[in-house]
Amino acid sequence: MSKKKIFIALAATFLISILIREYHNWLLHRSSDMRNERSVLLSDRDSLRCTIYLPSHAGARVGYHYEIMKRFAGSHNLIVKYIPAIDSVPVWDLLKNQHTDILVINIIHDPVPKSLAGKVCITPRITPLGEVWIMMKDHCPWHLSLVHWLTLFKQNPHFQKFTNRFLPSSADRCPYDSLLRVVSKPLGWDWIMLRSVMYQESQYRMNAHSPNNAIGLMQIRGSTAKDMNVENPFDPEENIKGAVRYFAFLRRNMQLSHLPAEEEINFVLAAYNAGMTRIQNDREEVAKEGKNPDIWAHVAVYAPKQTQEYVQQVRNRYMGWVSASE
């Protein structure tokens, strides 16, 4: 081979190696750019915001919608974020102004307003009562995916078992019993007592929200939720576990562990309703008068009437359920 041909071959080889190296660098940068684009996209849309607007008597049906939505969100690598309805803001405005992505509503009782006609997507009925999910057309590119997912979800062999946890909704049917059984063990309480507290507080409505900022199934105050490391007080599991941690906190800080179980529970319930400081002050007043501050019957007369009724109602419901199960 001539020197000229050898030179041309070496030059070609060198040029090809440069091109390959540059192409490889381009691929690395492109891959990095795509990862960054995905990261930005996920950071902007890593949650699915929902608002469940159903009447107070809906009970566990609220949780039914929430749990289905959590499953849909999970299948799309999203996290459900609950956006509560606010009395001062029309619920349709939450949807129209994109403060929430999905509005759960009873389409029979609350039809779509004329101003939104043709601008929303509506799923088939989620329950026989006319409860549907509604989204803005220009903000729900996944609408068809959602409808398809719901169709497949209802065809799942476990769908009926899942539904039976929540429907029909009644005082004697709590969809969170299995969780209550687990969390009650470290506390040492009968799980049915926790269920009685839950029904008293929210009637099993996971989106319950009082004017005093008590939130969720167990009506945990916002400040208490923060102290108990509850990030999402509307989420049933977080709410229940946070409440149980708070019960343990009350028992420990009120020094109740030496009391009989019935008295311990009475004082924890009273403090949960009226506040630990108030009940402790009432116990001190009882002690000053020479009565026993460790007996709720002695302390109850000093507590607010609402608290007296609260403890009694929770206990009566508990006793009724225990008797019915025997």
Image (cartoon, grey):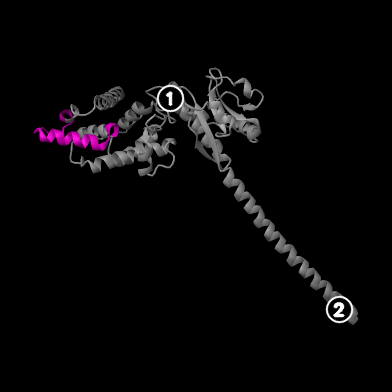
Q: Main secondary structure of the magenta part?
A: helix
Q: Is residue 325 above or below residue 191?
A: above
Give the residue displayed 65% in from the left and 36% down from the top.
141
User: Mark 1 or mark 2, which is nearer the start of the sequence?
Assistant: 2
Say if the magenta span includes residue 24.
no
Q: Is residue 305 left or right of residue 223?
A: left
Crowd class of label 2 (few under 14; some 14 to 19; many from 20; radius 10 Å): few
Q: Please tell me which residue is depicted at 36% across the width and 35% down the height of the picture.
A: 220
Image position, residue 163 (x, y; %):
49, 27
Q: Is residue 164 visible in the rendered structure shown here?
A: no
Amino acid type, label 2? Phe
Residue position for label 1? 59
Q: Which residues are magenta?
A: 272-298
- Disc ID at residue 7: 2
Task: Please identify the quadrant where the N terminus is shown.
Answer: bottom right
Which residue is outermost to the left? 290
Q: Residue 237 in the image: x percent, y percent? A: 41, 37
**Badge 1 amino acid:** Gly
